[in-house]
Image (cartoon, rainbow, N blue to C red):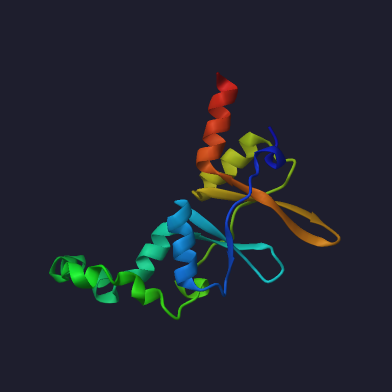
């Protein structure tokens, strides 16, 4: 199996995409993360769902998690209002690592090793040529495991 055969269509966003829209996309499709693309369509970051959750938790609760117990349900239900007026760029960690990128000819083992090494739930499959970068799709950890298990049986 090659990366090009494992790659599937996947939801992507730009760094200037509205944060609420990105959160809805994650929730509706139950995605572990979103692939963030730059203006040229090249992968620039991965926005994990856990990072999006962190963006809605008030700073005072992050500093002292025991304060979460004193926030009533009415206010807790409105946490996502913290995303209004923010972009994906605002929700990314300040030390965003480069997203893992596989070449179309990489083997399943190469993709698995890359995914494990950087602890990422996804790997972008990118074709590079003189015309630039073209995203072929994404390989998720669950899809890779499914294909590896199917091949083993």
Determine whether, in the image, residue 41 is placed left or right of residue 33.
right
Q: Where 92 sits versus 102, above or below?
A: below
Name the quadrant of the C terminus.
top right
**135 and 24: which one is in front?**
24
Residue drawn at (49%, 60%) of the image: 25
**Does 113 sit above or below residue 78?**
above
34 up-or-down from 61: above or below: above
Picture coordinates of residue 126 (x, y %)? Answer: 71, 52
Do we see residue 85 in this rendering? Answer: yes
Residue 44 in the image: state x and y as whole percent: 61, 64
Residue at (72%, 68%) from the top-left corner? Answer: 40
x, y (%) of residue 48? 46, 58
Residue 51 shown left or right of residue 77 in the figure: right
Q: Residue furthest top?
A: 153
User: Does residue 92 appear anywhere in the picture?
Assistant: no
User: Split into 4 quadrants, where in the image is the N terminus?
Assistant: top right
Q: Dividing the picture into quarters, in which one does residue 16 lie? A: bottom right
Q: Position of residue 85 (x, y in %)?
A: 45, 81
């Amino acid at each position: 199996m090659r990366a090009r055969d494992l790659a599937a269509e996947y939801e992507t966003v730009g760094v200037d995409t509205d944060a609420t829209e990105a959160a809805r996309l994650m929730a509706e499709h139950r995605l572990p993360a979103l692939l963030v693309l730059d203006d040229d369509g090249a992968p620039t970051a991965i926005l994990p769902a856990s990072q999006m959750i962190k963006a809605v938790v008030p700073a005072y609760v992050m500093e002292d998690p025991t304060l979460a117990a004193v926030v009533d349900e009415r206010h807790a239900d409105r946490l996502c209002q913290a995303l209004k007026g923010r972009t994906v760029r605002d929700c990314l960690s300040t030390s965003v690592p480069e997203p893992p990128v596989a070449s179309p000819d990489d083997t399943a083992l190469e993709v698995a090793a890359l995914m494990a090494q950087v602890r990422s739930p996804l790997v972008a499959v990118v074709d590079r040529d003189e015309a630039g970068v073209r995203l072929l799709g994404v390989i998720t950890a669950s899809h890779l495991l499914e294909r590896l298990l199917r091949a083993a049986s």
